[in-house]
Image (cartoon, rainbow, N blue to C red):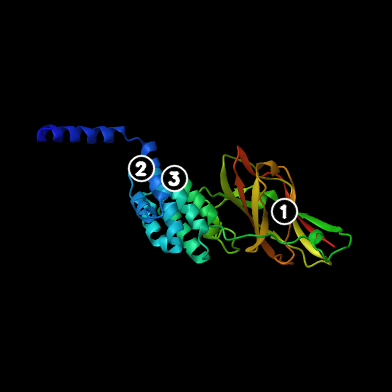
């Protein structure tokens, strides 16, 4: 074949191959190389800089699995330019970090640097350090006596303060702390808000002098849908059973956190994922013996 003819033939073949490549074929080829132990690391590194967002998203995940916590500095450099799916995979990587300080720092970096609001909310949600719940008197294995409600004190609706938390960052800003400055929060009654979001409620209430009792509980008549509770800055516990629990009352023990004869601060973080949410029924302090 003539040299010039050969050149044009090869050029046409290259153009045909490039035109024939599809996102599916490109990703299939990359995954095939990824499955090869000999090519794995090189394939991952190539995938990190791929023009294909699907490949980049998978590559950051594989890079973390390959390097573990040593991958975090490199992954953090990617946050500000990462697509949404890639960022969500960075959050998945963060959740696998065993060192709590490194996990917190990486999730905080995602929340601070990502341009995607959905990713910021998710990073802040995952960066929630509180867990567990206090044990109610009725749940104690060493308590086998009748429990009597000595007194019930209703918390006044008009004394609440409310603030939306659309970034899921209130717990990182200390909204639950006793001395948090909440003067600019909306004042008024509890009740519904419309839309899917997280919001916070705070109230100061006066506890009576210490009575003859064995326990103190907060009785929540209606919260839609999930709630996390602090008293005087102390994490008490949560009710997080999804949308189906929107009309189910629940109680949390605050015996160790309440300050008898003094002003107390109650903070409630509420998450709603449906149409309407909030504390929509009264909360009461039950004194038990």
3 or 1: tag closer to the N-terminus: 3
Q: Position of residue 79 (x, y in %)?
A: 39, 53
| Front disc: 2 or 1 | 2
Q: Give the CA separation, mark 3 to mark 1.
A: 44 Å
Q: Give the CA separation, mark 2 to mark 1.
A: 55 Å
Q: Which residue is mark 2?
A: 52
* Secondary structure type for disc 1: loop
Q: Position of residue 158 (x, y in %)?
A: 67, 49
2 or 3: tag closer to the N-terminus: 2
Q: Position of residue 27 (x, y in %)?
A: 39, 41
Residue 179 can be seen, yes or no: yes
Name the quarter where the C terminus is drawn.
Answer: bottom right
Name the quarter where the N terminus is drawn.
Answer: top left
> As rendered, which of 200 and 169 lies closer to the eye?
169
- 2 over 186 or under it: above or below: above
* Secondary structure type for disc 2: loop
- 16 over 243 or under it: above or below: above
Q: Is residue 138 left or right of residue 69?
A: right
Circle on res. 20: none
Q: Which residue is mark 3?
A: 85
Q: Residue at x 84, y 64 (%)?
A: 143
Q: Which residue is mark 1?
A: 155
């Amino acid at each position: 074949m003539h040299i010039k003819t050969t050149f044009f033939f090869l050029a046409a073949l290259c153009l045909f191959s490039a035109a024939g490549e599809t996102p599916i074929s490109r990703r299939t080829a990359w995954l095939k190389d990824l499955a090869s132990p000999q090519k794995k690391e090189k394939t991952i590194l190539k995938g990190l800089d791929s023009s294909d967002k699907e490949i980049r998203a998978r590559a950051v995940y594989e890079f973390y699995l390959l390097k573990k916590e040593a991958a975090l500095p490199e992954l953090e450099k990617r946050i500000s330019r990462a697509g949404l799916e890639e960022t969500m995979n960075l959050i998945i990587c963060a959740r696998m970090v065993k060192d709590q300080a490194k996990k917190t720092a990486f999730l905080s970096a995602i929340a601070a640097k990502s341009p995607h609001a959905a990713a910021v909310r998710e990073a802040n949600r995952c960066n929630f350090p509180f867990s567990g719940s206090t044990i109610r008197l009725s749940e104690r294995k060493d308590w086998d006596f009748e429990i009597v409600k000595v007194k019930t004190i209703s918390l006044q609706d008009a004394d609440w303060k409310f603030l939306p938390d659309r970034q899921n960052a209130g717990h990182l800003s200390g909204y639950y702390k006793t001395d948090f400055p909440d003067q600019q929060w909306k004042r008024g009654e509890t009740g519904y808000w419309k839309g899917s979001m997280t919001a916070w409620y705070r109230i100061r209430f006066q506890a009576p002098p210490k009575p003859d009792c064995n326990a103190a509980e907060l009785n929540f008549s209606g919260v839609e849908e999930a709630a996390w509770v602090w008293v005087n800055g102390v994490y008490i516990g949560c009710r997080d059973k999804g949308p189906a629990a929107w009309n189910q009352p629940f109680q949390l023990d605050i015996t160790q956190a309440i300050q008898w004869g003094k002003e107390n601060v109650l903070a409630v973080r509420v998450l709603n994922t449906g149409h309407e949410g909030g504390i929509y029924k009264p909360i009461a302090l039950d004194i038990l013996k």
